[in-house]
Image: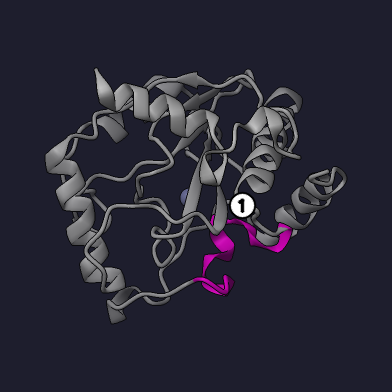
Amino acid sequence: MIGSLSALLAALSFAAPGGVPVAHAAAPKRPPIRHNWIPYGPKRKSEMAAYSKRHYGVRTNKLVPKVIVEHWTQSTDTASVISYFSHDVPDPELHELPIVCSHYLIDTRGRILQLVPLGLMCRHTVGLNDHAIGIEHVGMSDRGVMGNHAQLTASIRLTRFLRCSFHIQTRDIIGHNESLKSRFHHERVRALRNQTHDDMKTSTMRRYRQIVARQSCG
Ligand SMILES: [Zn+2]
């Protein structure tokens, strides 16, 4: 990731929609975010567009953010997650390309890594990948994420920042386990229309959304 692309990525990670610098927008302060871009070259971009055509009917890899989906990784270390997202082979669950990823990864010490620019789709939630920003938390359970003060604090700060930057409603901040109930869920592949995962259930996300909603966008 070099040259003009890195300039574009930097712009995307600092700018609100319409190119308005976040510092001048009525949004919570941007939390510290470390860039740790995973490989996302022309082959992966083409695969993402083909995935979008198969699943959403439109050949594009461009993300249009309307939803934020919270996840946990079912792992205890950060490096293995980044490695998994970086090797573009068919995923072991659904056997599709490109390999899954998320836009952000929050480690157990509360450090926020951005792995993919927000201009690009990631495969992290069946039925929502064209509209969902993905946030992964290194962890093994809803309780583990909600009980880790540093990680939860970073997560809430990041989610508030994204919610306000992209004008996403609180009800559209969901857990992966809530994906089928999202008003933006759509899936052309019949066999996947009821596919979801166990991470971040409604009982957890009710609490999470309450905390996010304590601060308005200004
Ligand atoms: Zn998940």
Please tell me which residue lies in front, 154 or 139.
Answer: 154
Please tell me which residue lies in front, 95 or 38.
Answer: 38
Q: Residue furthest bottom?
A: 190
Q: Is residue 87 left or right of residue 25?
A: left
The residue that mark 1 highlights is: 200
Is any part of residue 89 visible from this angle?
yes
Stretch of the chain drawn in magenta: 170-184
> What secondary structure is found at the residue carrying circle 1?
loop
Q: Residue at x 66, y 47 (%)?
A: 163
For residue 176: magenta?
yes
In the image, residue 89 lies at what x, y percent?
15, 42
In the image, residue 144 lies at what x, y percent?
66, 36
Q: Residue 12 appears in which quarter of the rendering?
A: top left
Q: How many marks?
A: 1
Please tell me which residue lies in front, 209 or 50.
Answer: 50
Q: Residue at x 26, y 30 (%)?
A: 86
For residue 100: magenta?
no
Q: Residue at x 62, y 57 (%)?
A: 174
Please tell me which residue lies in front, 53 or 89.
Answer: 53
Q: Is residue 191 left or right of residue 19?
A: left
Q: Residue 116 appears in which quarter of the rendering?
A: top left
Q: Residue furthest left?
A: 43
In the image, residue 135 lies at what x, y percent?
53, 41
Which amino acid is tagged 1?
A: Met
Q: Is residue 171 above or below residue 1?
A: below
- The answer as to whether callout 1 falls within 8 Å of ligand 1 is yes
Is any part of residue 1 visible from this angle?
no
Q: Is residue 14 above or below residue 122?
A: above
**In which quadrant will I find the N terminus?**
top left
Q: Is residue 47 left or right of residue 150?
A: left
